Image (spheres, rainbow, N blue to C red):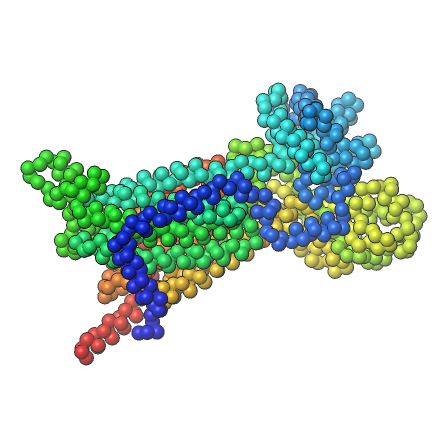
Amino acid sequence: MGWRRTDCLSKPLTGLFEKLGSTVGSCPFYFFVIPIFISAALGGGFVFLKDREDNDLERQFTPKKGPSKVTRAFVRENFPYNYSMFSQDRLTDMGMFASVIAVSTINNNVLESSSFEDIVQLNNKILNITVDNGRLGFNELCAKASGECVSNIILDIISSAKSNGTSITYPEHVHKSTSVFLGFELGGVDTDFNSTVRSAKALKLSYYLDDRESTAEVTKMWLRRFKALLSDELDTKHIDVSYFTSKSRQEEIDSHTTDGFPLFGISYASAITISVLSCLRSDNVRNKVWVAIFGVVSSWLAVISSFGLLLYIGVPFVITVANSPFLILGIGLNNMFVMVADWQHSHVTDPVSKRMAHTYKEAVMSITITALTDVLKFFIGVTSDFPSVQSFCLYTATSIIFCYIYTITFFGAFMVLNGRREASNRHCFTCMKIPSHKSENQSDMYNICCVGGNYDKTTGAEKKQQASQFFRDYYGPFLIRPWVKGAVVLLFVAYLAASVFGCFHIKQGIELYDLAADNSHVTAFNIKDREYFSDYGPSVMVIVKEEFPYWDNIKRSQLRGCIQDFTGPQFVDRDIFTSWLVSYLAYGEEKHLNLNDRGVFLTNLPQFFDLFPFFKLDVNLTGDVIHASRFIIQTVNVSDAEREIEILRGLQSIADRCRVASLIFYNQEFIFFDQYDVVVSSTIKNVGVITAVMLFVSLLLIPNPICALLVTCSIGSVTVGVTGLMSLWQISLDSISMIIFTACIGFTVDFSAHVSYAFISSKKASADAKAVDALSSLGYPILQGALSTVLGMSVLSLSEFYIFRTFFKIFFLVMFIGMVHGLAFIPVMLTICVRGSDKKERKEEVVIITKL
């Protein structure tokens, strides 16, 4: 039998926990008080909360080693930013700017006179914003090109068209002999067959500011004045205005980082209420009301201690960390209900220390399995490529450690104090000694309110609650019927099939405004931006990242073919294309230059750049060597995150196909697009790590390899199920949901591990009896833990933040599917898989008994 059991650690640990329970039962005071003092001391770390907040979008929510960051470093090195020649298409980062979207409220046309007049008045108010005691305005702080502010030329174009009676063409319009691209300024455009604009629903104005460090403070002041102006009630009767600044999204997230704390308080209050209701007993002595309250308090102390400790040592506090307390609440409640269930199985007449030894022996081993796997999982998550994931995992892993320690110390000590009250037959509220039997000489109200302490004389344990009796007498026997097992197996197969189907239809991607509140100006602006300005996406630099003989006619033709390939896909406009090389060849043809000659090609470049200074920004010419150059293409129809993924992958495929030169591509937004490929691989890696860790720990601590394997397989099953149902609930797979998903998936194993350990620890003879016994012991605690946690966290579904609503949705799916696994799938699978081995074991036992 030795080869079938893997309890090399479980036996000595069980004995150790039994001794610990006896120790806690003998002297609970120290175990109760010391955690309170530790929490009070570590809680002082919260004074550093504001200093530790770090919600920088790029630093926290993009992969540290994303390919676009490497490309950006190359672009910055080879094409240094020229502050005197501002070009929006050539920016390597967001820069400093403010933006306004004006949507017409009459006739759906911002070009209509009354709407346009409101826009002009708004523009004048913005241009009149001053800072530094009125000394500096937009004209002094603006980004410049050739000495002039980069202004909203669209206003000049519309004014000129109205005054001259001319028409505007879209997306390109010739203004003062210069072709101007209007795809970023006009939205919801309706044109005729000549590309003449009939109407436009929206107009976007952008105000770019000088981004030098020397002017950083005053430009920030100007942006704050801009925000204050747009936040006030504007006299704009004919347009609806939304605004955004380069600092808006960051400021919005920073201002709401701790908004999860009120939700945390409401959630804990709800959890206490629900836990108390589920622990109510009609017996005034055996009532577990205070145990339920202190079980939640134990989780709260764990969060205070862990967060305070990490804030003391300087770990960044990211908005994603605000989800951690809710997870710890679920773990703490689950531990509490398991401890209470095993306490109720102990003999009432035994000394409290002996009852605690029994409780620790049965419950703490199961709690240890889940705590150990969760801690290992989250500490491995610290190696993630996303800093926000690293912070979340570090805070959560530390919280789980404290939660585990406080469960077996602080909460265990309170159970001892409560147990001593029960042993003295004292009332749960008044602590006065009361009779254990009803008296005929007393009123019915007295017998209801002032009598208690009864127990099951047959077993010596507390009387089981009706819910526990339901699992023992009805649900368990029903579940082990052969036809019910068959139905459960078929249901499991159907569940897996539907889940796999959903997995292939899950969407990827995140809208960055999802990190802000629903009612914020950031969200309003970005929604309108998607609605009216999605016809044209980001302009993309296509970069030749190596020395190249541009004067070689054959290789140049091959290179132009590669660049032309970038304008072929349906997500690129082939007619909007900026190429210094094409323009230079046209210049050479006009000047009758032989640009196939290396010397002629390089000698005439400076004169060409003097005529077209912006093209000088696209060529890294040092001496007579062109180290790198770039071209600019225009993407189209970027309506959602899935389209962004398609663009990124499509451009990479085209770049990989070019053999004549090494090509890369870049836009500042691609820094955030990089997460899409990493999210899927990271999620798969995380689930794989969780599974491997769970298998390893289960094999060590669960004394049956089949049970350990089933617990591990349940992770895969729940993972597939949650992923499939996420697609039906319109939850995208992104960096936020990945954090929540991997965090919650590890939590599901708690139910399966508890049931499996109870199954294999049962003294019953047959597998069916073991299953009924396990469900009788843990069915109700599992139901209590799942329902109280989900109901307590339901407040998150009302949050204004996507991150909290997503947490609730995924957590609900995880808890529900995990509960179904723990109460139905796992017990049935255990009876099927362990039945044969049990028969052999009983046969061997009969042989041994006969010989004896």
**The furthest residue to the left:** 441
Is 498 left or right of 138, judged from the image as shown? left
**The furthest residue to the right:** 592
* Residue found at x 84% / y 55%: 625
Observer-nearest of 727 and 631: 631
**The furthest residue to the bottom:** 851
Is 41 left or right of 94, judged from the image as shown? left
Q: Is residue 46 visible?
A: yes
Q: Give the x, y percent position of residue 786.
A: 35, 48
Total number of numbered labels?
0
> Which quadrant is the N terminus positioned in?
bottom left
Observer-nearest of 617 and 470: 617
Is 802 left or right of 221, judged from the image as shown? left
Q: Give the x, y percent position of residue 206.
A: 69, 33
Observer-nearest of 471 and 144: 144
Name which quarter of the figure residue 284 lies in. Answer: top left
> Which quadrant is the C terminus positioned in?
bottom left
Vertical placement of 519 versus 46: above or below?
Answer: above
Vertical placement of 194 versus 389: above or below?
Answer: above
* Residue found at x 15% / y 47%: 454
* Residue found at x 35% / y 56%: 367
* Residue found at x 38% / y 50%: 403
Q: Give the x, y percent position of residue 610.
A: 87, 42
Q: Is residue 783 visible?
A: no
Q: Give the x, y percent position of residue 138.
A: 72, 29
